[in-house]
Amino acid sequence: MDNEGKNGAQTDKQAVLGRLRDTKALYVVVSACTKLPYVVCDPETFDDEVLVFFKPEEAEAKAKSLAGEKIPVSIVKLENKQLLLFYTNLYTMGVNAIFVADSGKEELIQLEEFVRRRGDEPGEEDKVWVENPALHLTALYYMQEARRQPGPEMNSRLMELQEEIEMHFRKGTFILAIQKEGNGIPLVKMKNGDVYQAAFTDILEFQKFNREDQLRPVIVPAEKVSQVLAGDAIGIILNPVGINLPLAVNRPPKQESEQ
């Protein structure tokens, strides 16, 4: 590409960056399987990206195209005041890029090009942020595939993702919830009767669950989760308002009382 072409491409990108900040509304493709932005791994760049549009009709056309591939999605309209939280939340999901389509033109924007990650702000260097982006991202891909249609077979791709989830979980630190009054623990009962304890990859997911502000967060590393599970729980359910992923946890064997 000659200098004129490079300058033109750079100008186009700067224009898109400006619109991502200033647009009155943005239309986001959201997965029906996770209730979160639909995530795609770019086949050429291997970026983990979400799909956004400035025009609702173009977003709906993309949703229709994905439906033809048996990928259930919807379109969510975000107002300008919601955009900063949306962009920031992408970091906690493990997403690193935004695929922008507008009037037949396409642009791939790196998230770090226009929004800072929490913890990178001046004065925040010493703060501890509980985030599990690799786990969250892998779980998103897993749930997008596993919930596409009833009764999916455990194919090699799902098995691979499941192994990655287990690996990332063992390395993670999570947020559990306790009631501010009474120290009760929120539990989720599945249709088959199994009980799981709510757990969260990051504070934003905790806040979604804690809308009535009746819970307080407790930070627990993965190796300690089994020790703090509620009595009836057989594991945790990760991000109940989002991916809603149940994970069985092996409890330590009970110590026999000394004679």
Image (cartoon, grey):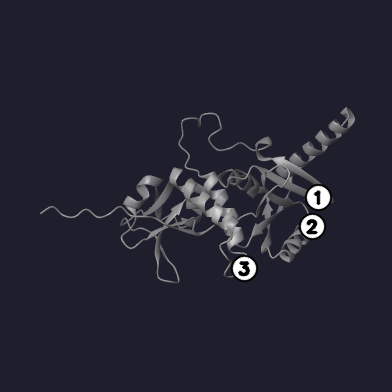
Residue 54 spot, x, y in % from top left: 76, 51
User: Mark 3 or mark 1, which is nearer the start of the sequence?
Assistant: 1
Say which quadrant the C terminus sits in.
bottom left
The answer to whether residue 120 is visible is yes
Say which quadrant the N terminus sits in.
top right
Q: Looking at the image, is 53 positioned above or below residue 118? A: below
The answer to whether residue 219 is visible is no
* Mark 3 Cα-neighbour bin, 10 Å: few <14, some 14–19, many ≥20: few
- Kind of residue at disc 3: Gln
Query: Does the residue at mark 2 contact the one at mark 1 (Cβ under 8 Å)?
Result: yes
> So how many labels did they put on this image?
3
| Residue at x 64%, y 42% (from the top left corner) | 96
Q: From the viewer's perspective, is the residue at label 2 or at label 3 nearer?
A: 3
Q: Which mark is residue 102?
A: 1
Q: Secondary structure at mark 1?
A: strand
In the visual, does 80 lie left or right of 185?
right
Q: For mark 3, what is the residue? A: 149
Extreme residue toward the front, this view: 156
Q: Secondary structure at mark 3?
A: loop
- Kind of residue at disc 1: Asp
Asked whether 182 or 125 is in front, the reply is: 125
In the visual, does 5 lie left or right of 74?
right
